[in-house]
Image: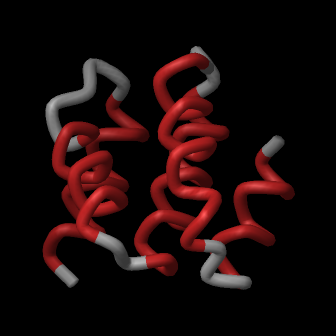
Amino acid sequence: MRRAAYILGRLKGVLAVKNLRALFDRTGDPYVKREVLEALQCIGTEEAADVILKAADSDMVIVRKKAESLLRH
């Protein structure tokens, strides 16, 4: 799943944002969530930014720190 999220981000797969958002919400794996955030940052749509903003309030430190980092850039 992490690899798929990575590839979608690098391809800037705008159509994948909905699925990446669903994966982010569904998974409990912080490393998958972190990779999804990276992919969403690469895609760069408003919906993608909303997920990153929401992730900045995550209880998972890895996820929260990644979101905060992405929001600064």
Say which residue appears at 20% left-offset and 57% top-offset: 68
Give above or below for 9 relative to 36: below
Say which residue appears at 63% left-offset and 23% top-offset: 29
Give above or below for 28 relative to 9: above
According to the image, what is the colour scheme of the structure?
Answer: secondary structure
The N terminus, quarter of image = top right
- Give the farthest residue toward the front: 15
Say which residue appears at 26% left-offset and 27% top-offset: 58
Residue 70: quarter of image: bottom left
Residue 69 placement, left or right of 3? left
The location of residue 48, given as percent across then percent down, is 36, 60
**Nearest the camera: 14 or 25?**
14
The C terminus, quarter of image = bottom left
Say which residue appears at 57% left-offset and 51% top-offset: 36
The location of residue 27, given as percent across then percent down, is 61, 20
The location of residue 28, given as percent across then percent down, is 58, 15
**Nearest the camera: 71 or 8?**
8
The location of residue 42, given as percent across then percent down, is 50, 80
Give above or below for 69 relative to 59: below
Give the mark count: 0
